[in-house]
Image: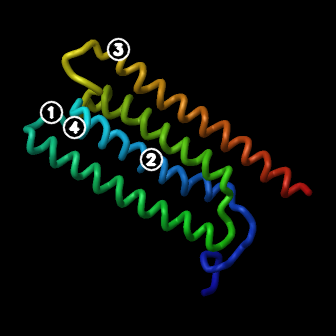
Amino acid sequence: MSGRRGATSGRPDHRRSVGVAALIGVAVMAAVDEIVFHQLLGWHHFYDRGTPDVALLTDGLLHAAELVTLVAGIFLVADLSRRQALAVPSAWGGFFLGAGAFQLFDGIVDHKVLRLHQVRYGVDLLPYDLAWNLAGVLLLALGAALTWRAGREVRRAEAR
């Protein structure tokens, strides 16, 4: 194979490791949401403004999208690893960035802007919304801190 994709770099790739792991973080958080809140607790479906059949269909579509995203992310991580370009600390940062981004996007865009569903029905939403979005902010903050620290280490290593 020729070109960059087939090359074995042997150097950790901070940026790609963050991006690929963020994809996995999005997929894992979507799976947690779908399994815990849609299936086990039954608090909501991806789209609650239609019939129960439509709600179930949208949950299935979310599940299919999360699985495709997870498998793609795993293949991309395997490729980075094969090329010895996976920067593991950077990947952990990316994972938490992706998980937090999904959580916050879901809480703000899906719940409030598009009103596809709420966290829960028949209760005061404010504590649930605050907990949901705070969890996303905390995951993002953790991911940002890990990514920043990993990037700093990469820059130090390159300066040597």
> Which residue is painted at 28% across and 32% down in the image?
114
Q: Which mark is residue 63?
A: none
Residue furthest bottom in the image: 1
Inter-mark Cα distance, 4 to 3:
19 Å
- The answer to whether 156 appears left or right of 93 in the picture is right
Local crowd at mark 3 within 10 Å, few (<14), some, or many (≥20)?
few
According to the picture, the residue beneath numbered tag 3 turns out to be 126
Decide which of tag 1 and tag 3 comes sooner along the chain: 1
Q: Amino acid at mark 4?
A: His
According to the picture, the residue beneath numbered tag 4 turns out to be 45
Q: Secondary structure at mark 2?
A: helix
Q: Which mark is residue 26?
A: 2
Residue 105, percent from left and from top? 41, 36
According to the picture, the residue beneath numbered tag 1 turns out to be 49
Q: In the rendered image of this protein, does residue 36 appear above or below residue 159?
A: above
Inter-mark Cα distance, 2 to 1:
24 Å
Mark 4 vs 2: CB contact within 8 A: no
Residue 90, percent from left and from top? 66, 51
Q: Secondary structure at mark 4?
A: loop
- Quadrant in which the C terminus appears: bottom right
Residue 13, percent from left and from top? 69, 61
- The answer to whether 30 appears left or right of 2 in the picture is left
Q: Amino acid at mark 1?
A: Arg
